[in-house]
Image: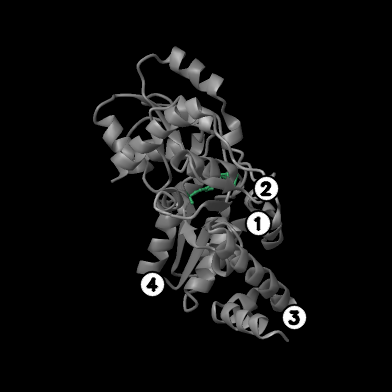
């Protein structure tokens, strides 16, 4: 076997990736990561990987890894010429808005998001006309056009903090597009969903379908279990768990506590990564796959880096300038 391939197999094994490969598959994975990492250097590219990606992407080729907030923040400081976004399109669009001179690539045409697709710029203009004077607080899981109509962007990592600051100045506000996350946050802040917070009818196809009744079943089966859920889950489920947050908060919670077992109610990639990061802890899988996140593979990343003219993420300058204002407001209020 080629010496470089052998070294790469050893590197991936030290990261624990052999545990998720079937017999003989690690060599195939190593061949892909080796070539991607070589091309990355040659082209001065950086790979952003969201925690819902598969561990072979996150650990094998990822340079900047984290939740949507961390990725947006980190990619402001990269000096790479190319940002390859292993995540979904709205995340790559945000990276492009923050780095207009860089080439931003998404290695899949199918990396959308049900939340992002739930609301258009025309919808937001209509909402603003119906509720004149109310600020529009928008989840980052939206298109650049929708961000351009917004006053401030939030992610799951900073939404509670930013909303609290917005409510200090406004009695009511508009929150789009996730009706579940909005209602969860409104309740956390002692506000009435639908009254103090005008909501939109969007939802995440992954998180909306978890069954709250199962939490109790798991608690009986695993005494001492701590249940964590992403803020995009419906309120009935949030009421049944011990902790609600974004993926970054959930990872920090696991890191800083010592429960007998953790139930992670979110996309499956998160649990896979948590198992590899904390091999001494017990994780119970209650996860669902995001078809958009999972449309990216090592093969699609390699094909994109090898393409003579890969399709770039573009945002019209006027939209980008208005969207950037709302994104910058998030960085200011989250600080
Ligand atoms: P995080 O910012 O918490 O990683 O969430 C992004 C997302 O798409 C959750 O479904
Ligand atoms: Fe969008 Fe849900 Fe997938 Fe996150 S998990 S990218 S919110 S569809």
Query: What is the CA distance from the residue labelled 1 to the residue labelled 3?
Result: 28 Å
Labels 2 & 4 near each other (Cβ < 8 A): no
Quick check: marks 1 and 2 in contact, CB under 8 Å?
yes
State the image coordinates of residue 211 (x, y, percent, origin top left).
Answer: 59, 50
Viewer can see residue 175: no
Foreground residue among 298 and 52: 298
Numbered circle sitting on residue 23: 3
| Residue that numbered label 4 is attached to | 258
Which marked residue is nearer to the observer: mark 2 or mark 4?
2
Q: Are marks 2 and 3 in contact (CB under 8 Å)?
A: no
Badge nearest the viewer, 1 or 4: 1
> Regarding mark 2 in the picture, which secondary structure is present there?
loop
Q: Is mark 2 within 8 Å of ligand 2?
A: no
- Quadrant of residue 305 within the rendered picture: bottom right
Q: Position of residue 299 (x, y in %)?
A: 71, 61
For the residues labelled 2 and 3, the Cα–Cα distance comes to 33 Å
Residue indicated by mark 1? 305
The reply to whether callout 3 and callout 4 are in contact (CB within 8 Å) is no
- Characterize the local packing of mark 4: few (<14), some (14-19) or many (20 or more) Cα atoms within 10 angstroms: few
* Disc marking residue 310: 2
Q: CA distance from mark 1 to mark 2?
A: 8 Å
């Amino acid at each position: 076997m080629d010496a470089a391939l052998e070294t790469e197999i050893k590197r991936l094994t030290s990261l624990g990736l052999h545990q998720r490969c079937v017999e003989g598959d690690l060599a195939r994975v190593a061949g892909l990561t080796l070539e991607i990492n070589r091309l990355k250097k040659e082209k001065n590219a950086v790979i952003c990987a969201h925690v819902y990606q598969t561990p072979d992407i996150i650990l094998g080729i990822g340079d900047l890894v984290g939740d949507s907030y961390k990725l947006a923040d980190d990619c402001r400081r990269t000096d790479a010429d190319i940002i390859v976004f292993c995540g979904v399109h709205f995340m790559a669009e945000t990276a492009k808005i923050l780095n207009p001179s860089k080439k931003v690539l998404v290695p899949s045409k199918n990396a959308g998001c049900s939340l992002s697709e739930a609301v258009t710029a025309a919808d937001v203009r209509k909402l603003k006309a119906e509720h004149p004077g109310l600020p529009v607080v928008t989840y980052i899981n939206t298109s650049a056009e929708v961000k351009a109509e917004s006053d401030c962007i939030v992610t799951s990592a900073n939404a509670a903090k930013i909303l609290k600051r917005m409510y200090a100045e406004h009695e009511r506000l508009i929150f789009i597009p996730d009706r579940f996350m909005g209602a969860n946050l409104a309740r956390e802040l002692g506000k009435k969903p639908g009254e103090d917070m005008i909501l939109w009818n969007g939802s995440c196809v992954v998180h909306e379908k978890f069954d709250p009744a199962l939490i109790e079943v798991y608690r009986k089966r695993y005494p001492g279990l701590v249940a964590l859920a992403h803020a995009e889950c419906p309120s009935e489920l949030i009421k049944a768990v011990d902790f609600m947050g974004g993926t970054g908060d959930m990872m920090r919670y696991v890191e800083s506590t010592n429960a007998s077992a953790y139930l992670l109610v979110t996309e499956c990639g998160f649990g896979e990564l948590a198992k590899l990061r904390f091999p001494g802890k017990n994780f119970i899988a209650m996860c669902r796959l995001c078809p958009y996140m999972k449309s990216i593979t090592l093969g699609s990343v390699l094909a994109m880096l090898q393409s003579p003219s890969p399709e770039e993420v573009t945002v019209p300058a006027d939209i980008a300038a208005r969207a950037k204002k709302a994104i910058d407001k998030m960085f200011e209020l989250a600080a």
